[in-house]
Amino acid sequence: SSASQNGDQILGAYIVDMIGFNATGHQHFNIVSNDVSQVLGERMLAVNDAYQIGLHSNSAPFVYATYSDHERFWAYDYKSILLIEHAPPWENFPPWYTANPFYHRESDVSGTVNIPQVEKIAKLTLGTITCMSGGIVGIAEAALAGLAEDFRLAQNYPNPFNGGTEIRYQIFSGGAVKLRIFDIAGQIVATLVDRNLAPGDYRLSWDGLSDRGEQLPSGLYFLALTMNGQLNVRKLTLLK
């Protein structure tokens, strides 16, 4: 309430609650959201996908529920989502989740915690917050794109561009390849490649259109190539 009274601007709040149990062997979680907060969940899933964190989740539109602290942000018109084992955690969701028998019980001790899942959730939350606060460039530059060993992504040409630009990349070992365009908020705006590719040299053109066929506004974008858990990123400047 004090933030609202002070007129503070909050881009969004990510509430992590009851996220450490899963006996199925899967790394599963759910996002809970209201209508205006859906974008927070969508950006989180984009980060999970772009950086291959490996978590399974529900998809938008995300379920609505009020059983945690995110509801207090909603009460003051702030965007907020809840990350939880499952929504609700007392229901089975085979094969991804079985109801948590330790939910709010004294038997919920450290030995019941799924540490690999907690680690992935922490990575996903911190990565998403970084994107929200400074755009995807904050993560992309920290990833040191030049460390990728299985492929090479060249700088697009021309850059800046108006009307179209050519993108070239090399695949040294075959595998699943994703080549996507992100805006500065970390949201996927265009997917150029999403398939298995054999080793070789590739090139394609991008006309500045989104996946919906809409012309994107002028500005800075990020071209991200992911494969085998590796990432390479280039900056693109679109001028219209």
Image: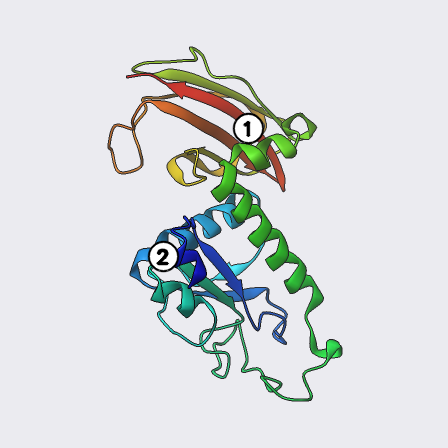
**Residue 42 shown left or right of residue 141 in the figure:** left
Residue corresponding to mark 2: 37
Report how far apart the C-alphas of labels 2 and 1 lie in the structure. Answer: 28 Å
Residue 204: which quarter of the image? top left
Q: Position of residue 121 (x, y in %)?
A: 60, 59
Quadrant of image for the C terminus: top left
Q: Secondary structure at mark 1?
A: strand
Residue corresponding to mark 1: 233
Foreground pick, 9 / 179: 9
Q: Position of residue 12 (x, y in %)?
A: 44, 53
Residue at 47% in and 76% down: 93
Type of the residue with mark 1: Val
Return the disc, 2 or 1, that comes first in the chain's sequence: 2
Q: Residue furthest right?
A: 111
Q: In the displayed structure, would residue 163 be above or below residue 13?
A: above
Q: Residue furthest top?
A: 158
Q: Residue furthest bottom?
A: 106
Q: Position of residue 82 (x, y in %)?
A: 47, 65
Residue at 44% in and 48% down: 43
Q: Residue furthest left?
A: 214
Type of the residue with mark 2: Ser
Q: Say how the picture is coloured.
A: rainbow
Q: Position of residue 69 (x, y in %)?
A: 47, 70
Q: Secondary structure at mark 2?
A: helix
Using the image, tell me which numbered label, if any, was put on residue 113.
Answer: none
Q: How many residues crowd mark 2 within 10 Å: few (<14), some (14–19), many (20+)?
A: some
Foreground pick, 149 / 183: 183
